[in-house]
């Protein structure tokens, strides 16, 4: 077999969607994975060490994608997963059924994000429609990317058209 017959496949680098953080450093507003869901911490308490071992960190968190509340307990000093998130602001070009056609800072068109359908984001969906249909100002939409999912989380009016 000669070297010219060899074929190689391209594969995903397997980049992680989470990073490790120390459970002692968690505070309100921190992002952490709770029961496999990306959550924003809403309440943190610590239980002192007792006869059953080390101190515990007890936290409540609200899922940043679905708004469900989760509770969990970690040992103090444990390294826990925190989701890697990214927020990008786009200019809305068009609404096609429920799909948003968005323009980024580099002039690239993105059309794989839907109008938010989640109950806690109904007001965002209504505001997007309201600003777009009025047509007087730009409609600037913030898209949150987390755990391989994208979701419109915020909207605001831009400059006059």
Image (tube, rainbow, N blue to C red):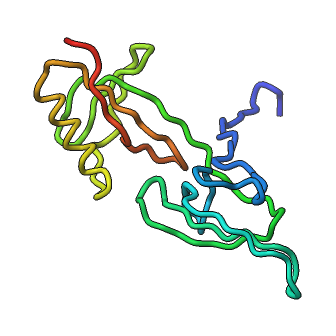
| Residue at image location 46% in from the left, 47% down from the top | 149
| Residue at image location 57% in from the left, 67% down from the top | 60
Give the quadrant of residue 157.
Answer: top left
Relative side of 107 to 57, left or right: left
Among all residues in the image, which is located at the extreme bottom? Answer: 51
| Residue at image location 49% in from the left, 34% down from the top | 87
State the count of labels: 0
Among all residues in the image, which is located at the extreme left? Answer: 134
Q: Position of residue 42 (x, y in %)?
A: 54, 59
Image height of 103 relative to 147, above or below: above
Q: Position of residue 122 (x, y in %)?
A: 25, 51
**The C terminus sits in image quarter:** top left
Image height of 30 relative to 101, above or below: below
Relative side of 129 to 39, left or right: left
Q: Nearer the viewer, residue 103 or 125?
A: 125
Image height of 141 relative to 21, above or below: above
Q: Nearer the viewer, residue 144 or 55?
A: 55
Q: Position of residue 121 (x, y in %)?
A: 30, 50
**The N terminus sits in image quarter:** top right
| Residue at image location 31% in from the left, 34% down from the top | 155
Relative side of 113 to 139, left or right: right
Q: Position of residue 85 (x, y in %)?
A: 56, 42
Image height of 47 relative to 155, above or below: below
């Amino acid at each position: 077999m000669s070297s010219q017959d060899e074929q190689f496949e391209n594969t995903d680098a397997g980049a992680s969607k989470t990073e490790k953080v120390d459970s002692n450093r968690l505070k309100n507003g921190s992002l952490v994975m709770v029961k496999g869901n990306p959550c924003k911490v809403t309440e943190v308490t610590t239980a002192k060490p007792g006869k059953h071992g080390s101190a515990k960190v007890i936290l409540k968190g609200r899922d940043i994608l679905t708004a469900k509340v989760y509770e969990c307990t970690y040992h103090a000093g444990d390294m826990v997963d925190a989701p890697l998130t990214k927020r990008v602001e786009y200019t809305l070009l068009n609404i096609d059924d429920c799909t948003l056609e968005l323009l980024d800072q580099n002039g690239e068109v993105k059309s794989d994000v839907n109008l938010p359908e989640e109950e806690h984001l109904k007001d965002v969906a209504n505001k997007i429609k309201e600003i777009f249909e009025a047509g007087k100002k730009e409609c600037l939409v913030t898209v949150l990317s987390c755990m391989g999912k994208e979701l419109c989380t915020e909207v605001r009016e831009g400059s006059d058209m």
